[in-house]
Amino acid sequence: MTEKIPAGTGLTTEYFINKNTILPLLKPFIPKNRGETVVNIMKNGSSGGNNIYSEAGLAWTKFSTHKYLRYCAQCVKEDAEIYGEAYWHRLHQIPGIFVCPKHRTLIADSNILNLSLPREFNPAGKYLKEQPESFNSDIMEKLLNFSIDSYWLINHGEILGYYGKTCEIYDVLLKNKGFRYLNGSTRYGRLGSAIAEFYGEDFLDLIEAYNSGACQWCKRILNNTDKVIHPVYHLLLIRFLADSAENFFTGEHGKPPEYLPFGEPPYPCRNKICDYHLTDVIETIFVERVNGEPRATFVCPYCGMTYRRKRNTPKEQQYFGQIDITDYGWKWKQRFIELFTAKTPTYMIAKLMYCDLYTVFKFGLEYGFIPPEKLKKRRPYVPKGTKPKIISTDEQRKYYRERWLNLISANPSARRGDLYLKDSKCYVWLRANDKTWVEQNAPKPQNKGGNVNWGNRDDEYVGLLKDAAEKMRAESGKSKRITLACIARTAGIGKLYRELSSGRLPKTQAFLDDNLESAEQWHRRKILWAVKTLRENGHLNLKWLKKLVALSGDSFKRVQDFAAEAMRSIK
């Protein structure tokens, strides 16, 4: 159509789109790819099934379109004086527009149905209908502000960017006003409640933007950057954040505070052999997000050590805590080589270099100081959910038997204890699962019985135990129960229970059978001591007796009669 218009008039396709459609109002809220599709449809017509209302996000809007064409009486009068006739203003037909921003008067419905527009021409002179009802001053002021913002956008939207640019402004203002954290997550509940309080329920109900006391539509606006949300919602959020659409798109909003999940730079070096250990020398770090959480990489400029930290870690916590070392750095490696060259023991290198033995062996192998066969093995990594290979008992028995025989063959003069120290895992498995075989194929125990005179030892032990028993019974204060372990310890006999199990100490066993105390015998002995002690102090009564012997409940009930008899008889 526009190619038929004479050149030089300025009446281009872009001119008609910007001056006669509502695209300028929609442009700041449409993703760039969809906005370009809408412009292309307007210029060349629909093709390939594209629908301009769907692309512009208006096909499924919940906002009801006006039933009649609408007008401002002052605008009609002014148009007739200037142009000789009135015309329909595009702004007056937009949902949510109730007040003319130019004349600050209410907009009225005409008697022309919107449904009749495609079938016939309707000049703006055939309109008159009764005037709309008025609103209170607060609602009128908010409706006027909404109209002013819409009017500014419809006249300046053509020079504004698409929704990507609008989202950048949203991000700055939301962070500066405390509705968005510095890590990018938005406090939607707080934002929605603040918007509802700012506008009030009556106003939001009037323009169909209120629900349940918190404006949940703000989440749809800020989350769906690839979809189109009706401009009514955007205009409400814009006025709330920036006081006007003009200030939102053209004003200076400053920069929000920088997101620093690991505190303010500089950061400390964590290499303990570095001259700048725990000193703030790392000026910049590389931060990335892994599974939604920040992860930073730190590199010390003085020693080359590289380490990583996960999650938000404030500056005051940078000087301690777990770190993942990815590179020990040139200074650490240089010192490591010096220690190995000086033939420092591996355990001492691990201590001086603040690492484990596996790391020492790994770098020792890398630099040629340790042969590969001496590298300490770690358990292989088994992915989560992987079923481990099941080895049968017969296969394990065959493996450990062969391992044990090879160990004996390599150490023909070693005793059983020496073999155990060399391969305890093998010996323990065979003792638990193949005891008969390992006894037949192990060095015979030395000195089992040997030259010990068990008769003399039996008499010696009886004498030591008698002295120990008398000592334990004569002790002042609370007595100890005469048990095998306690009396053997008092007598100075180590591992008595093992020698008793051999059956070579019959006198010792008989003495112990007569003198070891049961729990009740021990309790009675304590009661006798407690009765004498309390009688001497003049505080003999049942309450003090129970307290002194530290018995209660069922334990005391079993010796209660004995205690009563002792209190009566002992003087």
Image (cartoon, grey):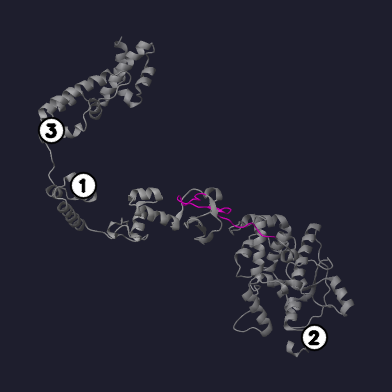
Is 170 on the left or on the right of 117, as rendered? Answer: left
Is 414 on the left or on the right of 178, as rendered? Answer: left
Disc ID at residue 9 = 2
Viewer-side label of 2, 1: 1
Rendering coords of residue 41 (x, y %): 66, 82
Residue 8 within the magenta-colored segment of the rendering: no
Q: Earlier in the sequence, mark 2 or mark 3?
A: 2
Range covered by the magenta-colored residues: 254-278
Disc ID at residue 420 = 1
Residue 180, by quadrant, is bottom right
Location of the C terminus by quadrant is: top left
Residue 259 within the magenta-colored segment of the rendering: yes
Q: Earlier in the sequence, mark 2 or mark 1?
A: 2
Viewer-side label of 3, 1: 1
Rendering coords of residue 256 (x, y %): 65, 58
Q: Secondary structure at mark 3?
A: loop
Q: What amino acid is at disc 2? A: Thr
